Image (cartoon, helix red, strand yellow):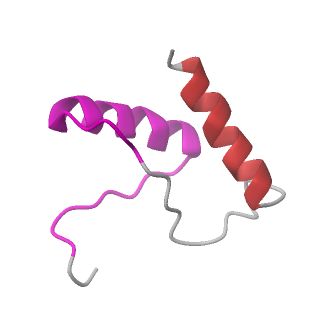
Amino acid sequence: MSGYESYEIVETMDNAVKRGLELAKEKAAQVVLLSPACASFDQYQSFEHRGESFRQLCLQLQ
């Protein structure tokens, strides 16, 4: 990927949220941004469905 020094590819939203939390703690980040690189119609019905899944997974962390 051009211009990026560090990135990770994960297979599921659940894995992405867990890894995002780990990295946020490691880097003392206050925000984690969901920025999908492509559509995920194989896993979700729509971008709204994907966003709601992300929200629910994040709420489970509290």
Q: Is residue 21 magenta?
A: yes
The residue that appears at 59% across and 23% down in the rendered structure is 59
Count of marks overlaid on the render: 0
The residue that appears at 64% across and 36% down in the rendered structure is 55
The residue that appears at 36% across and 32% down in the rendered structure is 21
Horizontal and vertical percent for residue 52?
A: 73, 42
62 to 21, vertically: above or below: above
Q: Quadrant of residue 48 in the image?
A: bottom right
Foreground pick, 40 / 55: 55
Q: Quadrant of residue 9 in the image?
A: bottom left
The residue that appears at 84% across and 57% down in the rendered structure is 45
* Part of the protein shown in magenta: 4-32
Q: Is residue 33 left or right of residue 50?
A: left
62 to 14, vertically: above or below: above
Horizontal and vertical percent for residue 4?
A: 21, 73
Quarter holding the N terminus is bottom left
Horizontal and vertical percent for residue 8?
A: 32, 57
Q: Is residue 12 left or right of residue 21?
A: right
